[in-house]
Image (spheres, helix red, strand yellow):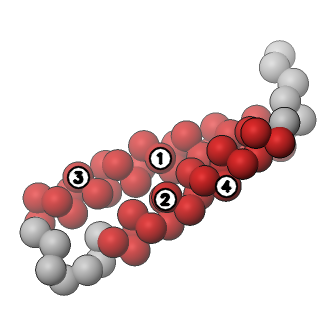
Amino acid sequence: MKDIILKRNELCKKSIKLRCAKFQADIPREKVTKLIEEQDKIYKKYKFYDNFIKIGGKIK
């Protein structure tokens, strides 16, 4: 379970970094779109792990 919590925390940190990076003025518009898509993917993975931890690792 500890490895799942560590993975969740790592994904959270990556998501926050990408969210902050997209507001930098020196990034081209095309890259901002890619950053948003990548951040969405990482956030969805984070939510999966977060929900898995909330239910206690039980799969029904």
C-alpha span from label 2 to label 1: 6 Å
Q: Earlier in the sequence, mark 4 or mark 3?
A: 4
Mark seen at residue 59: none
| Horizontal and vertical percent position of residue 52 | 76, 35
Dot 1 lies on which element?
Answer: helix
C-alpha span from label 4 to label 1: 11 Å
Residue farthest to the top, as pictured: 60
C-alpha span from label 2 to label 3: 13 Å
Q: Which residue is mark 3?
A: 34
Disc 2, disc 1: CB below 8 Å? yes
* Amino acid beneath label 1: Ile
Q: Which residue is mark 1?
A: 42
C-alpha span from label 4 to label 3: 22 Å
| Horizontal and vertical percent position of residue 59 | 81, 20
Q: Earlier in the sequence, mark 2 or mark 4?
A: 4
Dot 2 lies on which element?
Answer: helix
Disc 3, disc 1: CB below 8 Å? no
Quadrant containing the C terminus in the rendered view: top right
Tally of numbered discs? 4
In the displayed structure, 14 sits above or below 49; it is: below
Mark seen at residue 15: 2
Mark seen at residue 9: 4
Residue in the image at 40% along x and 74% along y: 20
* Amino acid beneath label 3: Lys
**Left or right position of 1 against 27:** right
Quadrant containing the N terminus in the rendered view: top right
Residue in the image at 29% along x and 57% along y: 35
* Amino acid beneath label 4: Asn
